[in-house]
Image: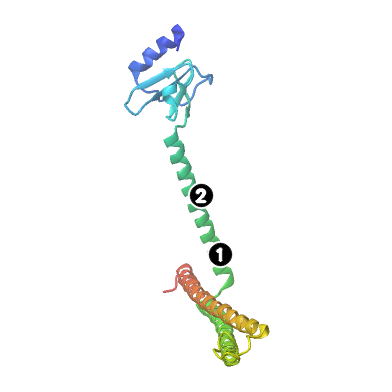
Amino acid sequence: MRFTIQTAALLAALACSGPVVAASSSSSQAAFYRCRDASGQTHYGDSKPRQCEGLDTEVLNNNGILIRVIEGTVSRTTREQREISESGARKQREQRQLRDKMLMDTYLAVEDIERLRDQRLELLDSQYRVTEQNIANLRDRQKRLEQQVARFKPYNDKPNAPPLPDHLAEEMVNTVNGMRVYQQTLAGTRREQDEIKSTFSADIARFKELKGIK
């Protein structure tokens, strides 16, 4: 690459004086680019040198003053990761502050939180008991159906046994599927109860902390 006499003289002076530390200048027009590779070698150019691709590259003006830095791959990745981390931490702080405000605005005492927790748990307990009864009813129906279908093929090995009627087969399938759904509902209700207990325990602990209650 060809350099002007002025640029060449400037580069020679910069090479002797070391890295540029200035951050402002009256002139913002780029005069040349400079970067340092992994081996410590410095590369210059009137335009960005090929060796500077992916590296932090300084842009300097005619006075050798740093105008800006073109981020390299490592610097850009580090900055983006830092920004993501800072954004996540900021959102967590905001959510925590919002949660604290809700606790203070909603409850006057720990007993208020416990009362609401117990109400929600009792509601889920009622739903759980209803679901258990539904499963018990379906099991009774399944037993009756099993006795009925035992008279038909393929469940009966007798040569003169009639084929299983479609309505009985359909009812048996619906009964088994219904029990499966209710059992999944039971498991979901238990999970929800555990989550409520965990959430309210955390709320009570935080409320005490905010109120200074031991």
- Front residue of 62 and 212: 62
Dot label at residue 50: none
* Total number of numbered discs in the rendering: 2
Dot label at residue 87: 2
Q: Position of residue 59 (x, y in %)?
A: 47, 23
Q: Are marks 2 and 1 in contact (CB under 8 Å)?
A: no
Q: Position of residue 84 (x, y in %)?
A: 49, 47
Q: How many residues crowd around disc 1 within 10 Å: few (fewer than 14), some, or many (20 or more)? A: few
- Nearer mark to the viewer, of 2 and 1: 2
- Front residue of 113 and 158: 158
Q: Residue at coordinates 51% horizontally, 61% vertically from top-left?
A: 96
Please state which amino acid type lies under the numbered disc 1.
Lys
Q: Residue at coordinates 53% horizontally, 19% vertically from top-left?
A: 29
- Front residue of 51 and 80: 51
As measured in the structure, the alpha-carbon distance from the residue carrying label 2 to the one carrying label 1 is 21 Å
Q: Position of residue 126 (x, y in %)?
A: 58, 85
Label 2, secondary structure: give it. Answer: helix
Please state which amino acid type lies under the numbered disc 2.
Ser
Residue hosting label 1: 101
The extreme right residue here reads 167
Query: Is the image coloured rainbow, by chain, by secondary structure, or in one colour?
Result: rainbow
